[in-house]
Image (tube, grey):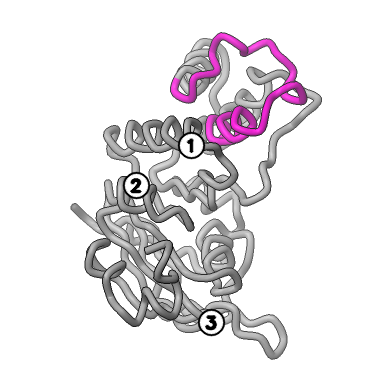
Amino acid sequence: MSELLTTDALTKRFGGLTAVDGVSLTVRKGEVLGLLGPNGSGKTTLMNLISGALKPSEGRLLIAGSDLTGARPDRIAKAGVARTFQLVRILPSLTLRENVMVPAAFGPDRLWGAPLEARVTECLETVGLAARAGQAASELAYIDQKRLELARALAAGPRLLLLDEWLAGLNPTELHEGIGLIRRLEETGLTIIMVEHIMDAVRALCPRCAVMNSGKLIADGPTDAVLSDPHVVAAYLGEEDA
C-alpha cells in the first residue's frame, strides 16, 4: 500500500491553547485507522485540519503526495477527502435523494444526468436507504440520519473517509449493523480514519490505532498492542472499556 495521507508535525493553536501539538501520522491506501483518546484530546481538531475546516498553525498536510497545507475545504474535497460529523449534518427540508444529490452534483466529480442518478442510487443502496429515497430527511430516526450523512459523504466519491464518532449513540442492534456497513466500505478499498470510543467497534474494524492526549500523539501501532499498553489503558481508555 502507498501513502494516502501524511501529517508532518501538524499543529493548531487557539490563542494560548494548543489543540493539536506536532502530530505526525501516515495513513496508507486501504487502511482503517482508529483515532482514539479522551474528550478534548484533539481528535476532532485533527480531523478538521485534515478536511480543511481549520488551517494549521504549523506543520504540513499531504494527500497522495500533494502538499495541501492550509488549502480550502473544496480543494481538499477535490483531492478525495470526505467526512461525517459528531453532530449529524443533513438537509432536513430535502428528500433523501436530494440530500445525496447535492454532494454528487456539486462535489469534486460534478456529476449530472445519468451518472448523477446512478451515484445517488448506489450511495443510498450502500447505506440501506434506497427504498426511502423520496422521504423527507426530517422524518428519519437518528440511526437513519447517520446513514444518510454517510451516503452524502460517499456521494462525493472519496478516497479518504473521516468518520467522527459515527457509531456513537446507537443501540446494540444498530451498532452491529453500523460495524457491518463500515466493514463493507473497507472491503471496497476505501481508506478510513475513525474517531471512536466504542472499543468493541475499534477491535472489530481497525487493525491499527493512534491515540491522542492533550493534543499530542502518544501511541500508534497495531490495535491489540495499543489497547493493551498499560499506560494507554490506565491513562486514556480506562480499565473497564479496554
**Among the two numbered marks 3 and 2 on one chain, the one whose residue lies closer to the N terminus:** 2
Q: Which mark is residue 214?
A: 3
| Label drawn at residue 112 | none
- Residue 43: % across, % down: 52, 66
Residue 115: % across, % down: 48, 16
Numbered label attached to residue 172: 1
Disc 1 to disc 3, C-alpha distance: 31 Å
Q: Which residues are magenta?
A: 126-152
Secondary element type, mark 3: loop
Q: Is residue 204 magenta?
A: no
Q: Amino acid at mark 3?
A: Ser
In this view, the residue farthest toward the left is 1
Q: Based on the displayed image, in which of its 4 quarters is residue 98 positioned?
A: top right
Which residue is labeled 2 in the image?
191
Image location of residue 136, percent across then percent down = 74, 18
Query: Considering only vertical position in the picture, is 15 above or below 75?
Result: below
Image location of residue 133, percent across then percent down: 62, 13
At horizontal 66% and vertical 42% (from top left) the residue drawn is 88
Q: Residues within 10 Å of mark 1 (few under 14, many from 20)?
A: few
Q: Are marks 1 and 2 in contact (CB under 8 Å)?
A: no
Q: Secondary structure at mark 1?
A: helix
- Gap between marks 1 and 2, in whole Å? 25 Å
Mark 1 or mark 3: name the one nearer the start of the chain. 1
93 and 115: which is toward the camera: 93
